Image: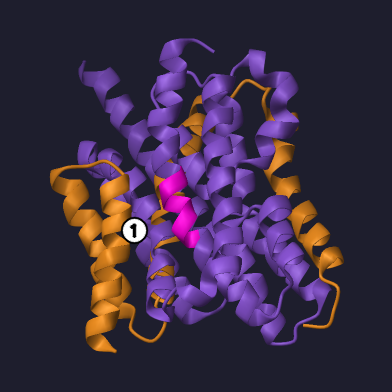
Chain colours: A orange, B purple
Amino acid sequence: MGDNLIPLILGMAAVTYGPRLLPFLFFSNTQIPRRVDAFLKCIPVAAIGALIIPGVMTATPEFPQAALLGIGFTAVYGLFKGGIIVPVLGSVGVTYLALAGLG
Amino acid sequence: MVKQEIQDAAKAGIPIFIGYFPAAVAFGILSKTTGVSLLESFLFSAVVFAGASQFIALNLLTTGMGFTGIILTTLLVNFRHFLMSTYLSTRIKERLKKYYFALAFGVTDEVFSVLSFKKGPLSKGFVFALQMSAYSGWVSGTLCGYLLGGFIPPILSQSMGVALYSLLLAILMPEIKASSLSLFLALSSGLLNWLLMYLDILPNGWSIIVCIFIIATAGAVITLNRSHKEELHG
């Protein structure tokens, strides 16, 4: 890539930082009405659900099944045990094995 | 920072580091194969610090899209953090006010997810320790991937891309185990996003924002109805 990417990086940084910062400056002093609070409390699960599905299948574009098996491990392990380190590293391992087997 | 806070932060921060590292390695490798310099790859992670949109930017660079287009796409893709910061601003108490500028920089999907499910008020020590472990995992992973990528088999680096998603799911699991409403909302949101992406009617990044709005509104209606009934019967 011949182009100097620094202007792109700075531009991306600005449009990423802006939306992260503005709510703190604008909303932190305001009293939140009960209805809005109920809405805000549902943002985490709604956001995480939409972030995982269908994005996970793009992680291994040629064999989406491999990524599905990997995240399936996280779901099953998390269901019975929990934690983060084993489910995350395990999912990478399972995906690797699935790709090695399929490829 | 009291001892308990340090322990809490380490307990939450180490897994985040371990989840971020392989995903960043994948980014480092991909940026090298895209033809980005080491300095630029480092700056992507150190200055932008936004997982998914960095991958998208590399992708768009290879398609020949101009900088303005990529920056606009990044704005759309990352605008969801506006909603996340709005939520966090209601959770973080007065004494953190002067740290807002530093704090806002670290509002990533994963940090947000951990913070949002932590019980009780959020202290600045905890928030910063968590963000620093995420940041150091992301930046060091990028450098490792770029420098050592040649020694990592392509299948393994691809598998590492799954880490970001399993990290999110692992964070979400306790919440959806404890509440069937959370499970329902998370699944509906994911399926709705899938449908919207499949139909391809919204610009990149907006489908997630639409999902958050629709599903969080539905969730609010359900919880408000529930508490209303409890008030009537209780």
**Where residue A78 appears, x then y in whole percent?**
21, 48
| Chain letter of the residue beneath label 1 in the structure image | B
Q: Which residues are magenta?
A: B17-23
**Where residue B83 appears, x then y in whole percent?**
59, 44
Mark 1 surroundings: few (<14), some (14-19) or many (≥20) residues within 10 A: some
Q: Is residue B71 above or below residue A30?
A: below
Which residue is at 32% across, 26% downward? B227
Left or right of B232 on screen, residue B76: right
**Where residue B144 appears, x then y in whole percent?**
56, 61
Callout 1 amino acid = Ser
- Which quadrant, please, contains the N terminus of chain B? top right
Left or right of B30 on screen, residue A28: right
From the image, give the main secondary structure of the stretch colored magenta: helix
Which residue is at 34% across, 58% downward? B188
Residue A6: quarter of image? bottom right
**Front-most of A26 and B149?**
B149
Residue A30: quarter of image? top right
**Where residue B178 appears, x then y in whole percent?**
22, 36
**Front-most of B164 and B226?**
B164
- Which quadrant, please, contains the C terminus of chain B? top left
Which residue is at 60% across, 42% downward? B107
Which residue is at 68% across, 87% downward? B63
Helix, strand or loop at disc 1?
A: helix
Residue beneath disc 1: B188
Is residue B214 one of those drawn in magenta? Answer: no
Report if residue B47 is visible in the image.
yes
Q: How many marks?
A: 1
